[in-house]
Amino acid sequence: MKSKIILLGLLTFSLSSCGIYSKYKPVTEVPENLFGQEVALSDSSSIATLTWQELFTDAPLQALIERALEGNTDLQTASLRIDQAKATLTSAKLAYLPSFMLTPQGGVSSFDHSKASWTYTGVASASWEIDIFGKITNAKRRSQALYLQSLEYRQAVTSSLIANVANLYYTILMLDEQYRISQETAVIWESSIKTMRSMKEAGMTNAAAIAQAEANYLSVKASVLELAQQINEMENTLSVLLGDVPGDIVRGTLFDTSLPDDLTVGVPVELLSLRPDVRSAELSVASAFYTTNAARSAFYPSISLGGTAGWTNSAGSMIVNPGKLILNALGSLTQPIFNKGLNVAQLKIAKAQQEEAKLAFQQTLLNAGKEVNDALTQIQTAQGKKSIRTEQIAALETAVRSTQLLMQHGSSTYLEVLTAQQTLLAAQLQQVADSFSELQGKVNLYQALGGGRIE
């Protein structure tokens, strides 16, 4: 008896050393300088830990995000994938249990017009594969990893959906503001043309200057129409994202919108714990790990127990009434012999797929660092440009007023006034774009850090 225990212990140790029962160990380290710059080492005030309701406080935007989470078809498809993966996991867990089958049979027979004879057999059979070598365990762990991966896929769709809705919303606000500035500029330039015509009658300007002013005025009018078209297209795009037909979007204004200025990034380990694509990529590694373990277990025999029990009145050439009890029990051990080459090939394939999953995971980490760095740079650049742009617009407004006064006194031409006005308009439109770029950068950073998790 003691020798059997020792033999069993050695067998268990040899199996564990082969890796068929080993568990996947999560990654706890990431490449140094992942974000491309120094970041604050904080895990409590990171922008990614905020819920989307805390980040986006604009009531119309919150309403749009809620509509998207309810009506977006991509998100609904992701939920269906979860149902499929959950059913697969349930099937893998049930593989531990014995399988039962009831096979009742009955028949009637007659030979040479003799009296018909009725026979019946009611048999219940059971079979159970003992998971000594880890085949079922690794299949279950792989299914569990795939199920968790489906959850992360839905989270990735959710995070992307929230960010896309926010970016489209802010794009519409930017276009609204540019539309307002262009309309006001068109009104001002139309008034300037009337003034110039009066000056022409007084001999203070000429027809060429008026024609140039009218051409620029018409150019602004055309840009107003173009902006209106872009606004309509963005509204339609956002409506489709919401899972709705095209329609008007209820919204606020660009400069009434604000996002938190505290943009603490957090340590790279926190990035791993939040980003759905990073978590999904690591779950792919785990799934491939258990596939490799299952491929190793194919080299070992499978042990199955089975039996039948039932009641029958058929005893070979005789019919016995009433029927008699039948019992049968068996055990089987199947050892692969001639398919060793196939098992070796399957193991090589599994190992290669595992290495491929590891490389994909590493690339996902690098992409994550790039996205965070890009978003931070975009925010910092937009903030710096906004500060410069404010001073630029103030200087250009002074230049427009000065050139207009100089033209009225005959010491300046309308070309100088026109140039100053055009430059001012371009700077005002760009200031709006800079404000949008800062908002977009914060939204992108929120997504890049894995924000917007909905558990």
Image: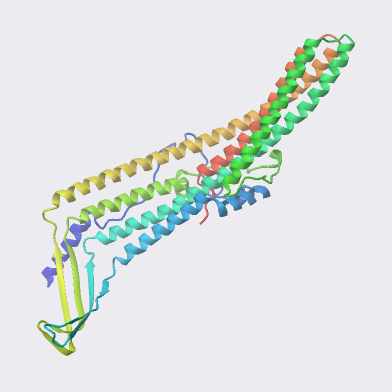
**Quarter of the image holding residue 139?**
bottom left
Where residue 181 appears, x then y in whole percent?
73, 30
- Left or right: 107, with 445 as reference point: left
Could you tell me which residue is drawn at 23 percent across and 74 percent down? 126
Tell me if residue 219 can be seen: yes
**Quarter of the image holding residue 84?**
bottom left
Could you tell me which residue is drawn at 17 percent across and 55 percent down? 299
Q: Quadrant of the N terminus?
A: bottom left
- Name the foreground residue: 242 vs 335: 242
Count how many numbered circles sit on residues in the image.
0
| Vertical side of 27 occupied by 210: above or below | above
**How are the residues colored?**
rainbow
- Left or right: 349, with 155 as reference point: left
Could you tell me which residue is drawn at 54 percent across and 36 percent down? 375
Where residue 390 appears, x then y in whole percent?
71, 28
Tell me if residue 38 can be seen: no
Point out the residue furthest to the bottom here: 322
Point out the residue furthest to the right here: 202
Where residue 89 appears, x then y in whole percent?
36, 61
Where residue 33 appears, x then y in whole percent?
44, 36
Could you tell me which residue is drawn at 75 percent across and 15 percent down? 212
| Vertical side of 246 occupied by 127: above or below | below
| Vertical side of 209 occupied by 128: above or below | below
Point out the residue furthest to the left here: 317
- Name the foreground residue: 23 vs 404: 404
